[in-house]
Amino acid sequence: MSLIVQKYGGSSVADATSVRRVARRIVETKRAGNDVVVVVSAMGDTTDELLDLATEVSPNPPGRELDMLLTAGERISMAVLAMAIHDLGEEGRSYTGSQAGLITDSAHGAARIIDVTPGRIRHAIAEGAIPIVAGFQGVSYESKDITTLGRGGSDTTAVALAAALGADVCEIYTDVDGVFSADPRVVPAARQVPLIAHEEMLELAAAGAKVLHLRCVEYARRSEIPIHVRSSFSDRQGTWVVDLTQPLPDIVPIAGGTPVEQPIIAGVAHDLNDCKITVVGVPDRPGEAALIFTAVADAGVNVDMIVQNVSVEETGLTDVTFTCPVASRQVALDALTAAQELVGYRDLRSDDGIAKISLVGAGMRSHPGVSATFFKALADAGINISMITTSEIRISVVTSKDVAEDAVRAVHTAFGLDADGEAVVYAGTGR
Amino acid sequence: MSLIVQKYGGSSVADATSVRRVARRIVETKRAGNDVVVVVSAMGDTTDELLDLATEVSPNPPGRELDMLLTAGERISMAVLAMAIHDLGEEGRSYTGSQAGLITDSAHGAARIIDVTPGRIRHAIAEGAIPIVAGFQGVSYESKDITTLGRGGSDTTAVALAAALGADVCEIYTDVDGVFSADPRVVPAARQVPLIAHEEMLELAAAGAKVLHLRCVEYARRSEIPIHVRSSFSDRQGTWVVDLTQPLPDIVPIAGGTPVEQPIIAGVAHDLNDCKITVVGVPDRPGEAALIFTAVADAGVNVDMIVQNVSVEETGLTDVTFTCPVASRQVALDALTAAQELVGYRDLRSDDGIAKISLVGAGMRSHPGVSATFFKALADAGINISMITTSEIRISVVTSKDVAEDAVRAVHTAFGLDADGEAVVYAGTGR
């Protein structure tokens, strides 16, 4: 018998029919001999509709009240799902984030989980019930006010609950079959990845892969919870996100328990939501970068890639380029404009027409040729690179947005990731 | 400075425009130097829509989950109202029933308030904020589950909070100007009642007047909270429901503080939602009525009026007639059918085509002629009476449904209640 946490997103519970389908899956899992805890998002577009209502009433609603409003969405979906389960003869019991013990800080709209005290959930499991927990929400330990974790927070709720309950797996149900080697809308030959390391998934999520939220993967990695990303519309196995440095847990249905070989590359991700800002003519002296990025950070802008050019000797000036979300572009430019005298730069330039292409794979560590293959694939496709950054298991480049899809396909093919190609593999567990 | 609890019903907060209008009224009350606590119902038809959703998913949803679902309605309205208040420069802070300390029993869908511990509300008032409390909901003291008080429960929430906070008045905002001497749709000459005793209001509510919920008036009477029923669409004074055996509190704007005279009759109410059931041929021996009404009560049917005819001597049989809500008719008939052998009656008859007409007024106590005038008015209008019951301050009769409106108008006119007539008065405070 396993303890399984299942998380269903808004598209899986969009209407009464979907809710009943999800209820059947939950009840089947329970009747197969497992304990099941469910985390559910708001139905379909409910959250957006509630946001529209808020905007209609107030141009700038306070965070505390916005959180109170938005949490009505999961309240509806969890109660309805519990009813559908009840109708199938099992006892579904819904719990708000607060009732389930999701304790957070007080950052309304982007609260962080501080503690999970799921006493009532444990009690419900012990009584043979199926607890249905509202995703995305918690309660502040200081103010006792209701908080939300921000978009994608339901995945995090699920993993946090799985960790606190010592669950065997956290199943994240979505409308795709799992994690793919690239976005299938861009690369039709992309293949589903059966098994991926937490750290690889983390890099893919950071690089723009939408299927799992960065925070949820990070939480799963730290608490060593296996995630199973799969479709709520089929019974197929999805993608297992696991700790590949350890023997696989029994619940992962891979012959022999441990895979002998893993592809060097987990996948190719791309992100079209960044922009590039160049601070032109920065004096080439110590502390300048600190001034620039303090100004940007103080404005709340998350900087991703940073590149500083070599200074031109005659002028003693250099250029500093960074990327950040397009949504933060104006805030970043305003912050830098306000800091111009302090920093002493000459000019600001910004470019929305960029894309970030990232190659992720834990096998990179032991295969020095990966970056060369990556750059050659882009060069052969005639694609120009304007920025490069690397981590231990990721290489990212910035290209022009209009060649982004060509770049993804070229790289995908070059690493043999296409479904009819031959993927480059590495020994999987010796790392 | 007064402490004022204001309750707004669903029609007062049906859309963003209404919410902003209500917010302005709340802020004006606050800025006039009062402390304000607001209780709000779900917006417009939200509760019905949520009920429809539940029905779509499950034919027989469990009460715990139905309560969880329905309470999403007030969660939305209170958050949105707090936002609108925030927008006007005051701090609205929304609180669920649970957060506001509305402690109930565990009867889902019809929970009773056991205690009110409004510590967070007091704290918010002390900080100068305007607490917005979800009506209709609470939390079970045993299970810690969310409960609802049943329809009309928001009025009860408001009065209960007003009592616990020691408020000066509980203002119930609705879409009519107050309590009328009869339903203005039936009696165009009905007039608004400026002042009415709790006990009179209680009888009117029990007799079918819709403006206030019976439980809320009962709660107000016991805790001696003045209620001011008024329209959220105007600034006019509405109807004050007060303890007329005491000097009026200062907050009631009546010249001289105490009215010298009150009409004998507060109003005429009618109720079309009852049916009449006759148990025919009941043996006339002790204990028969107990058998009948135990069977009916065990089936959960609320019986209103009861009449037993004199038995016909030859047969030793009698008939027992009672009224109950039409919605309970089939349940009552089934219960009686099951008890036929035990009771030993001959036949059952039921009639949906009845109306109950009630005359209410505390002045009846000291005016013995009231019932004679009442019956004469009906007789003059050619209206036949099939049942009669009286309480200390109420006379109710059952007529055929098709003459109900004629009966109400005839009685209303006979007691001089018509707006252009001369109402019969009695000394108001000496009782």
Image (tube, coloured by chain):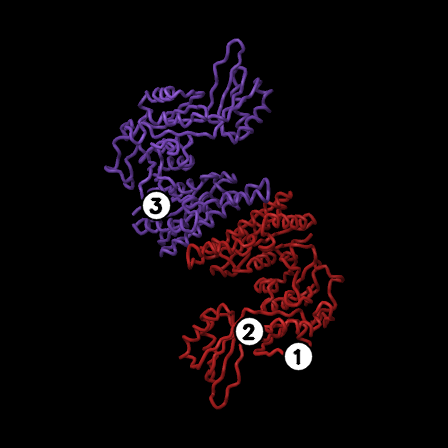
Chain colours: A red, B purple
In space, the residues marked 1 and 2 are separated at their CA atoms by: 20 Å
**Residue at figure coordinates x 41%, y 26% from the top left:** B357
Determine which of the numbered discs, if any, sits on residue A380 in the image.
Answer: 1
Q: Chain of mark 2?
A: A
Q: Residues within 10 Å of mark 1 (few under 14, many from 20)?
A: few
Could you tell me residue B40's position as x and y percent? 42, 46
> Mark 1, mark 3: which one is toward the viewer?
1
Residue hosting label 3? B4
Determine which of the numbered discs, if any, sits on residue B156 in the image.
Answer: none
Looking at the image, residue B424 lies above or below residue A412 = above
Looking at the image, residue A23 lies above or below residue A231 = above
Tell me, yes or no, if residue B426 can be seen here: yes
Secondary structure beneath dot 2 equals: strand
**Residue at figure coordinates x 47%, y 59% from the top left:** A108
> Mark 3, mark 2: which one is toward the viewer?
2
**Residue at figure coordinates x 71%, y 64% from the top left:** A247
Tell me, yes or no, if residue B145 can be seen here: no
Left or right, B160 with reference to A276: left
Could you tell me residue B422's position as x and y percent? 28, 28
Is the same chain shared between marks 3 and 2? no
Q: Nearer the viewer, residue B296 or A328?
A: A328
Residue hosting label 2? A354
Secondary structure beneath dot 3 equals: strand
Residue type at mark 1: give it. Asp
Looking at the image, residue B87 lies above or below residue A328 = above
Residue type at mark 2: give it. Ile
